[in-house]
Amino acid sequence: MFLLFIATLNLRPRAVRLTTKQQKTVVLVQTQAENAGAQEVARQLASGFEKRGWRTRQIFLYRRTESFDHEPNVFFCAPSRPASPLGVLKTLAALHRELRRAAPDVVITLQHYGNIIAAPVARLAGAPRVIANQLSAPEVVPRPVALVDKALGALGVYDHIVVNSAQTEAAYRSYSGSYARRLRRIDHGFIDKSVDLSKVEARARLGLPAEAPLLGCAARLCRLKQLDLAIALLAHDESHHLALAGQGPDRARLEGLAETLGVRSRVHFLGELDKERLGALLAALDCFVFPSAAETFGLAPVEAAQAGAPVVANDIDVLREVLAVDGAPCALFVDATDTPAFAAAVARVLHNPATREALTTAGRRLSNRYPLDAMIDQFMRLMEEPAS
C-alpha cells in the first residue's frame, strides 16, 4: 500500500478549489483520539490557528476514548482501531474522502503513524502543503515505520518536519540530507494548568486521601512510560500513595504489579482527566514523578513544574534540556530504574523545604521559556510561506 502511495507522489496534485475562499483551512491528522500529549498539542494548535483566522479541522484515524466526542470540527475515520486489512482500507478511504471534502490549504500530521499514513493520503487528496511532526523519539519508532518515514521525508512528501527540542532535532539530523533539510525546530508551548484550589480541596475533588504523602503522574499507561517504577516506590514507604492519570494498554499489568507488591490500595488509577481535573491533580500532589524511558519533549512534567508541583524525573538528556530555565533545573533527575535512588530523590522533595522551594520557583518560570503564542506563530510562518 505504501509503495502505491510512493509511486504516485511525483504527481503532487494540487487541491481543487471549487469556489474562491478568503478563509484558509488547516487540517490536523493523527492516529487515535484520546487525552495524551500529542492530542493536547493538536488542541492547542487548533485553538491558536482559529484565533488567527484559519478554519480548522481535526481528523483521527480512529476513536480510542470519548475525549474528543463533544469537540467541534472533529472527524473519526473509524469508531475503533481497525482490526483487519479491510478495516484499514476503509479507514484510509474515509481519510481520503474527508481530506478531499475539506480541501485544506495545509495538512499537519502528528505522531509517527499519523505522519506515514496521513501525509501520502493528503497528497493523493490534493493537499498543497504537508507539515509532519515528530512526536516520537527515533529509538522507539518501529524500524519499518522509520524506513517509510525516511523515504517520505527524502522524497518531499513532507514540506517541513517539525521537531520540538534540541535533543530530538539532533537525533533526526542523522537522517539523509534531503530529510534533514526539511527539519524545523518549534518548541512546545503550553497552557498553564494551575488552579486556585488548596491541596485539601484538590484531593477532595478527585477522591484522593486528604493527608497522605501523595505522588503522581499524568501519562499514557504504556510500557514506554515505565510507570511500574513509580509503583515500586510505594514499597519503600508505607505511607505514600500514588495517583496515575491516563489510560492505555498497560493498565492491567500495572494493577497486577500493585497487587503483587501489596500496594494496590495505595495506587489510584484516575483514568483520563480533562484540563480542569488535571489541574486539580497537579494541585493535589506532593511530588510529580516521571520515569518515562524516552521523550521528544516531555510536556507532562513541564506542565506539572509550571503548576507548582515539585518534579522528580528520569535522567534522560531531553528532560534535562526542557526542565530548566536559565540554567536552573526545574526537577531532580535520577536513574528511575534504580529504585532506592528514585525513592531517595522523592524523599528529598518531600522532606527538604529548600529543595521544594527551589524546584517550584524555577518551574513557575517555564511558561516564559515555552510561551504558547510563540509556538503558534512559528507554525503560522511555516503554513503561510510561499510554496516552493
Image (cartoon, helix red, strand yellow):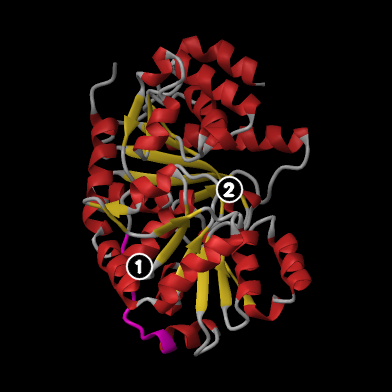
**Along the line of sight, which residue is nearer the eye, 248 or 230?**
230
Residue 215 on image: x %, y %: 51, 73
Mark 2 belongs to which amino acid? Gln
Q: Secondary structure at mark 2?
A: strand
Does 254 sit above or below residue 194? above
Region rendered in magenta: 191-200
Judged left or right of residue 30, residue 268 is right
Q: Which mark is residue 166?
A: none
Q: Is residue 197 magenta?
A: yes
Chief SS of the magenta region = loop
Judged left or right of residue 106, residue 95 is right
Does 139 sit above or below residue 12? below
**Along the line of sight, which residue is nearer the eye, 273 or 11?**
273
Judged left or right of residue 193, residue 269 is right
Residue 289 on image: x %, y %: 49, 64
Q: Is residue 89 magenta?
A: no
Q: Secondary structure at mark 1?
A: loop
Residue 21 on image: x %, y %: 28, 35
- For residue 267, which quarter of the picture? bottom right
Mark 1 belongs to which amino acid? Lys
Closest to the camera, between mark 2 and mark 1, is 1
Q: Which residue is mark 2?
A: 32
- For residue 361, which quarter of the picture? bottom left
Residue located 40% across and 14% down the image: 178
Q: Which mark is residue 193?
A: 1
